[in-house]
Image: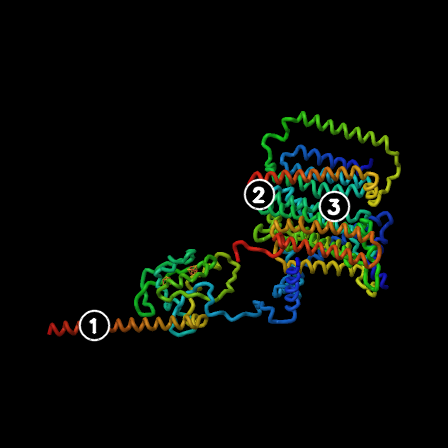
Amino acid sequence: MLGEGILKGMAETAKNFFGSYFSAERLTTVEYPEQRIAPFEAARVFPFLVFDSKNPGDGADWQTGMRCVACQICEKECPPKCIFIEKSKDKKPDALGKPQFYPVKFDIDISVCMSCQICVEVCPFEAIKMDTEFELSTVDRFGGLLLDRQQLAKSNEYYHQIHPAEAAGVDARLVAEKVKADAKARSAADAAVAKAAAIAGEGA
Amino acid sequence: MSFVFYILAALTVAGGLAAMLLKNTVHCALALTVAFAGLALLFLNLDAQFAGFAQILVYIGAVAILVVFAILLTRGSETPRDGVFSRTWLVGLVIAAGVFAVLGWAVIGSVRVLPHETAVPTVTVLQIGNALVSRYVLPLEIVAVLLTAAMIGAVIVAMHEKEGQK
Amino acid sequence: MINTLDQIFVLLRHWLVSFLPAAWQPLVGVLLSVAAIVCLFPALFALTTVFERKGLARIQNRLGPNRVGPFGLLQPIADGIKSLTKEDIVPLSADAAVHFLAPVLLLVAVFMGFAVLPMGRNMVFVDMDAGLLFYFAMSASTELSVFMAGWSSRNKYSLLGAMRAVAQMISYEVPLLLSSVVVVMMTGSLSLTKIVAAQSGFTWGLPHWFIFTPWGCAGFVMYAIATTAETNRSPFDLPEGESELVAGYHTEYSGFKFALFFLGEYLAMFSISGLGTTLFLGGWSAPFSFLTWVPSWIWFFSKLMLSIFVFIWMRGTLPRLRQDQLMNFAWKFVLPLCLLNLMVVALWRFMGDGWLRWVICSAILIGAYATMGWGEMRRGKIGPRSYRYAE
Ligand code: SF4
Ligand code: SF4
């Protein structure tokens, strides 16, 4: 009969209404500032720059340990163009000891950033990763949301804290790369030595 | 003829004048509602509650809405650029004068017929209802037939248009 | 003592007025009543907005507002301050005068409606002979303000919303009037106090409310449907369908004027629920004969709040109708039933007492409802939605 569905629906909502006062599992709301849910491994908000510190915890060497080499790939790839990088004139040794450029200026306008993670995908140096910090409200709409190099720099330990599995993978890869690079360097050195010896032998 | 009457009369006439003279047609319609409201208040001032409220219900609640609907649905809402005086104003004047004459004749005629009452008669809704279905039943039926015919005509006009589009 | 409590507001007014010279008394008495209405119902509105939000939240298994004050009860104060301090924007091309007048006229018309509602024994502002007609005249003149709001904003959404609202209100005014007329036919009076008086008796401890008769029950259901449409409440809230019209006719209103519209909408809901209470639910009379000692105004306001709760409940349950469904429903279903109900009530009146009229009248109404509903549903005019593209 006409109207049956309406009555059925009304009964359902009435059940919800009264049920919500009696059964706690109906109310799934988490009352945010007091209650929080543990962040997920894959949670992502805005990017940050990873640095390796010699003595974990102090963060004094954020500038020297920064993995970013100012290659500017992320700047080019960022869809809304919210990254601004200024490359250094000189070079400093990176984690592998190779002399590299470094960013004199690295700004991200997080009021523009859309958390797409493309910068992270394209960075060949594992230098930029996604943060999980989301309580970023500020009263300064322009300056407060433009994060500079120092504000962006977070230690590798912090990275391990927020994305343990992902960071472990990254570290393993970096170590493997370093081993490979070392091996290559050593073999190159060996080859050089051998060559030198051969030349010496020839000369002798 | 009290002070209140003059205020209400002025309001009604002002509404009517504005309805004629304003440029924007929707403004005219709104001014017309002011005139309707003034008429309703005049009825109330005469202690004719039923007539006054019926006037509000029918004229402000329905007729005014119909008028604005008609204006908006027929693209009449744009302000005419060349004045608001029709070219056939003379004909309009003649018609208006004719209507006014008929109304005046009716009013003067009825004054002579009606007994000169000093106290305001208290007419309840019940009495109005009784009068409508007993003494005035024929006019009521005629009006009803007329309105039904008008409605059927409107439906036919609307239907015809739809078929033409197919 | 009980009598004093019942008449407490009337006595209070007498007592306050008695301090004044005799010449002033009528005027001040009127002003006091106006002030009471003008303060009471907006206060009720403030409370209702919280309860509506909380009720809707509970219906959806959420918590609802609970931050401002204990249990979120001070939320309306925060909202009020917010809307008062917001910028009052009038669009550049809007018709400023009409734009300003629309909310004011709406509110005036809505407030006038309260004047004839008997809110308790001897608690009616003006006891008019044509009270019901006055009420409908006032509620009909709100339509024009809605149109004025929509038209003067010079915004397509506003205009569309206003046209929808006006079309809907005009269409549903017919069933609204026809479903109320049955009560007038039975009591033979348009005066709301007389209508309440006609329902004040008890049989076996049960009241003589009109809703407990076949025609009254049918009339009440149709009245409820028509009022929901008339007040633009869900499921008939097409005029402000957010998904297509932003906010309908008050899209271009902000700050205090928007608050006035919001207030007007809720006040219209209160007054029309109050009228429904008066017409079908016995007004301020008690639901059982052993409860007659409870002050009459308590009954009126509890019935009013109960109706409001049903409004909220429906809003939480039913999805919005489409425009054609809305119109079909009004003209092809509710209106014929209303007309039939008029015949039934005449039959009821002239059949005299006895159980036979109960059986015959109920049979006619239920039969008509069932066959019409079945026919309409079979023809797909009303009933469950069908989707052409989405499955
Ligand atoms: S963050 Fe990565 S991609 Fe961007 S400039 Fe630094 S090294 Fe290059
Ligand atoms: S997350 Fe996306 S939008 Fe944000 S900085 Fe990286 S590339 Fe740009």
- Measuring 89% from the left and 37% from the top, which residue is drawn there? B118
Q: Are marks 2 and 3 in contact (CB under 8 Å)?
A: no
Considering the numbered disc 2 on the image, is that residue within a helix, a strand or a loop? loop
Q: Residue under label 1, please give it.
A: A191
Residue C246 at x, y percent in the picture: 58, 51
- Circle 3 packing at 10 Å, graded few (<14), some (14-19), many (20+), is many
Name above or below for residue A177 compared with residue B94.
Answer: below
Chain ID at mark 3: C
Residue C77 at x, y percent in the picture: 66, 58
| Residue at the left extreme, as displayed | A204
Chain ID at mark 2: C
Asked if the residue at label 1 sits under 8 Å from ligand 1, the reply is no
Name above or below for residue A28 compared with residue B9.
Answer: below
CA–CA distance in space, label 2 to label 1: 81 Å
Q: Residue under label 3, please give it.
A: C137
> Looking at numbered disc 1 in the image, what kind of residue is underneath it?
Ala
Chain ID at mark 1: A
Q: Nearer the viewer, residue A25 or C371?
A: C371
Q: Residue under label 2, please give it.
A: C92
> Looking at numbered disc 3 in the image, what kind of residue is underneath it?
Ala
CA–CA distance in space, label 2 to label 3: 34 Å
Give the image quadrant in which the ligand numbered 1 is located. bottom left
